[in-house]
Amino acid sequence: MPPADKAPRPGIRSRGRAGGPRFVVQEHHARSLHWDFRLERDGVLVSWAVPKGLPPDRGTNHLAVHVEDHPIEYGAFEGEIPAGEYGAGTVSIWDEGTYDELKWSDRKVEVHLHGRRVDGRYALFQTRGTQWMIHRMDPAPAGWEPLPSLVHPMLATPGILPDDDEGWAFEFKWDGVRAVSYVDGGRLRVLSRNDRDITAAYPELRALGAALGSRQVVLDGEIVALRDGRPSFEALQARMHVTDERRARRLAAEVPVAYMIFDVLHVDGVSAIDLPYDERRRILGELHLEGPNWATPASNDGPGAAVLAAAEAGGLEGVVAKRRDAPYRPGRRDPAWIKVKPERTQEVVIGGWAPGRGSRTGAIGALVLGVPVPGRRGRLDYVGRVGSGFTQDELAQLQWRLEALARDESPFEGELSAADRAGVHWVQPKLVGEVRYTEWTRTGRLRHPTWRGLRPDKRPSEVVREP
């Protein structure tokens, strides 16, 4: 309850319809986001705290915790409850109106709500002590779709800028980890492009869920670590492999991340996947997603060459050209999206390692690299070796992981030359990494590759040769 000096004055009435007992749903940003559901009865507000808000469809029950009755006047309260007070945080009225009582007993309550946002029948039923559940009795509105549990991200094809800028939008390419985020009842769930739940690794992003409140949303974007104001894939390495949430919270203070949101796939029961790019960007803009650790970067009209030049000048990875009339194609690498890089990088699969000399005697001297052979699962085309760009910690971690993947036979297609085979310890082709390079040789080798780091967010089957 708010302190006395913040409580609404007696006699303040609900803005809902006259002619029946009132209900109010207050959105309460306290220690954890929840919604307070209150029904006027016998001179008080009978109240439940609902952590995920009112369920939008009959297929989902939400927890509702029965709390003490509140004074009628509290149904009109909106404002800030100061720190140190019970329920400290921000309270706003999410919906209000009148209701019809359908059933009322000690263990079950059924009502028909007539509000501005909600008009439907709901049942509350006790499960144990103060633990109740709230259930929507009516079908969801026509056309409503439940929040999808999994949407595979659409992938861009490597290439060059389109010949004609007309019909294309240009976005900066962020050097980070691709992530699809699901928000439901103020809670955030983040999945990598290989469907791994990485929510615990990035605790500073959880506030995005609270910022969206009761909205059900699926977002697509890139998690980046900033160093001197620029995305740094090297800095992000410290965050990518963390599974312990306590350690992740410590690292969040040292290497904070930002979520660059560039697409929306579902909003409040409506799928956006089949909508054209321009329409999805309009909907994304209306969500106003700007926060301490997330942003909605601009979509640029072009010319594409100027956007690419700006990306290079800003130390960014490049641009992605996107057809304005194209829908979102989940899980597909599609020519409607083209990634263009001023600096050449290549994803690679590690097929073996060669021992080093001198200070690296007995340790890894170079990684033996390949890209998957189309149609030949587990087989690689040899593209060369990389022996520079590693830290000592990376070498130690790589050696530990690669020794666990040891195998007797080469995973490379065809017979390698004696020089390419010399001293190599073959491994199962399961680890994906990334290198910088200057160009491809005529024989299909990487010229002057430098190691950038592992890519645990990507599968070997997803690796393609850059042009």
Image (spheres, helix red, strand yellow):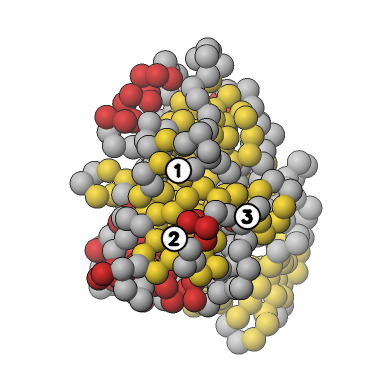
Residue 191: x and y in percent read 55, 58
At 58% across and 83% down in the image, what residue appears?
A: 130
Write the residue at 66% across / 31% down.
Answer: 327
Q: Amino acid at mark 2?
A: Leu
Q: What SS does tag 3 mark?
A: loop
The quarter of the rendered structure image containing the N terminus is bottom left
For residue 100, which quarter of the picture? bottom right
Query: In front of the other: label 3 or label 2?
Result: 3
Viewer-proximal residue, 434 or 277? 434
Q: Is residue 206 visible?
A: no
Left/right of residue 6 with respect to residue 400 in the rendered view: left
Q: Which residue is mark 1?
A: 446
Q: Position of residue 423 (x, y in %)?
A: 47, 67
**In this rendering, the label closer to the viewer, 3 or 1:** 3
Q: CA distance from mark 2 to mark 1?
A: 13 Å
Sequence order check: which comes first, mark 3 or mark 2?
2
Q: Report the amino acid beneath label 1.
A: Leu
The answer to whether the residues at label 2 and label 1 have Cβ atoms under 8 Å apart is no
Give the residue at x 38% y 25%: 308
**Residue that protrudes farthest toward the bottom in the picture:** 129
Q: Earlier in the sequence, mark 2 or mark 1?
A: 2
Q: Are marks 3 and 1 in contact (CB under 8 Å)?
A: no
Name the disc covering residue 415, or none: 3
Dot 1: element? strand
Between 268 and 372, the one lying in front of the other is 372
Tell me which numbered mark, 3 or 1, is placed earlier along the sequence: 3
Q: Which mark is residue 367?
A: 2
Residue 445 in sight here: yes
